[in-house]
Amino acid sequence: MPERVGVALPEFALPVSDPDFIRDPYPLLAELRAQAPAVFDPGLNRVVLTRHAEISALLRDRRFGRSALHRYSRDELGWPPPDPRQATFDAFNSNHLLDSEPPKHTRLRSLVGLAFTPRRVEALQARIEALLAAQLAGVQGAGSFDLVSTYAEPLPVTVIAELLGVPQSERWQLRPWSAAIVKLYEPSPSGQDQYAAERAVRDFSALLRDLSAQRRASPQDDLITALVQVEAQGDRLTEQELVDTCILLLNAGHEASVNGLSAGVLALLRRPHLWRELVDAAPHEGSLPIFRTATEELLRFDTPLPMFERIALEPVTLHGAALQPGDRVALLYASGNRDAAAFVEPDALVLDRTPNPHLTFGLGIHYCLGAPLARLELAQSLRALCRALPDLRLSDPQEPGQYTGGFVIRGLARLDVTAG
């Protein structure tokens, strides 16, 4: 891309592997946002958008997409041959709806949407409440514990496993599979990361093929059955499309929930007056809307998916830069979500902020299909935590948590808290 940029954009190398930046990217993002709406990152080899308006506009711009291979060959795009070390991952990634473009995307999203409905998600509310109660019963009186592994991780994995219909005996593999797969979305995955992701996709695919065959023979009340049976105008999902959709639902269906809840609780416990505000609201019947609004603000304030990208599908000039098909643009959601042009006091955590046009779930045709489930899980998890452990605090306010080391998908690996 550098030789094809038509004008000299400001250059800025994002330190996406720097632990200090991952821990707190916001001061540097504020500097970058003030500098320009678009910069060129020579390390990432991408134009990078920093501001809310520009990111929002590009997400709706049909001259950009999540893939370009539906229009061009790799040779035409000037892309290198695919890496054989991640062939299985690449096949999965090119076949699910997140990285597809119309008309394939339209077809897949329509079919999946017929099975993965808002009604199906809302019907999970009572089950989520019961699961949370069981989890909290295990930590009450425990003193100090890791919020990530003990509370944030189990619920989303259990919910997506039950939703899909994955047997209890197989569920222990889901979180490690997802953690391995999402590492390949980071800018510079290692060879070990590629190996682990390949194995995870192969193993999960094999399980899903077995389950889909079982559901064809003996339907159950689960999402795999619904995806097997869904049909529109004589069209159905192929087995491979079903498998890749389920893998995507696992990854997207719980990464935002785990990371969003952990980061949200950290932000609240650093501001005890806001934690107390939610604690006071939690016991009241009908308080879930308060927690839904707070969830939106927590997702804006500390974005669990800080950077996504789009690919130019035709020659286009972007902020003076002449892009060609195949050129990639990085969208700094975390920066756009702190833009003063879109949010009053963007660096303040305002639990009742309305409106809240945050970018966390994207915009346009690729708006996150799992957003309703993530929102429900986060709101209910936060309310249950406030009810059960009102005196929760950080075990060590100076060193409260450890981050996983990724920036594209950013989350806490550990968050030590003390109850009581």
Image (cartoon, rainbow, N blue to C red):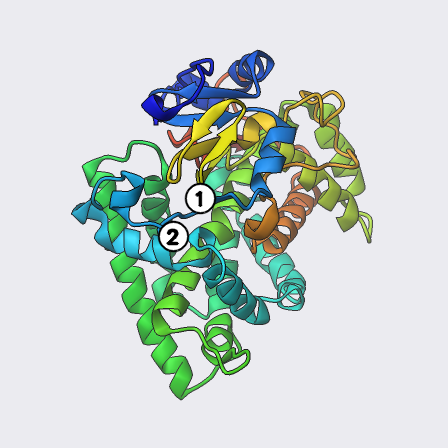
Residue at the (34%, 28%) spot, across then down: 1
Is 420 in front, or is 297?
A: 297
Q: Is residue 328 left or right of residue 82?
A: right
Is 253 in front, or is 420?
A: 253
Residue at the (35%, 20%) spot, across then down: 42
Identify whether 171 is placed above or below 395.
Answer: below
Residue at the (64%, 49%) spot, across then down: 375
Q: Is residue 238 left or right of residue 274?
A: left
Is mark 1 in CB contact (under 8 Å) with mark 2?
yes
Three-letter amino acid code at the position of disc 1: Leu
Tell me where residue 5 appears, x and y as whole percent. 40, 23
Tell me where residue 354 appears, x and y as whole percent. 79, 36
Secondary structure at badge 1 equals loop
Secondary structure at badge 2 equals loop
Residue at the (59%, 39%) spot, across then down: 360
Residue that protrudes farthest toward the bottom in the picture: 217
Instruction: Count neighbours of disc 1 (C-alpha within 10 A) and say few if under 14, some if 14 to 19, many if 20 or more.
Output: many
Q: CA distance from mark 1 to mark 2?
A: 8 Å
Is 102 in front, or is 222?
A: 102
Three-letter amino acid code at the position of disc 2: Arg
The residue under label 2 is 71
The residue under label 1 is 313
Tell me where residue 206 appears, x and y as whole percent. 27, 67
Tell me where residue 382 appears, x and y as whole percent. 65, 43
Instruction: Count neighbours of disc 2 (C-alpha within 10 A) and say few if under 14, some if 14 to 19, many if 20 or more.
Output: few
Splitting the image into 4 quarters, where does residue 281 fall?
Answer: top right
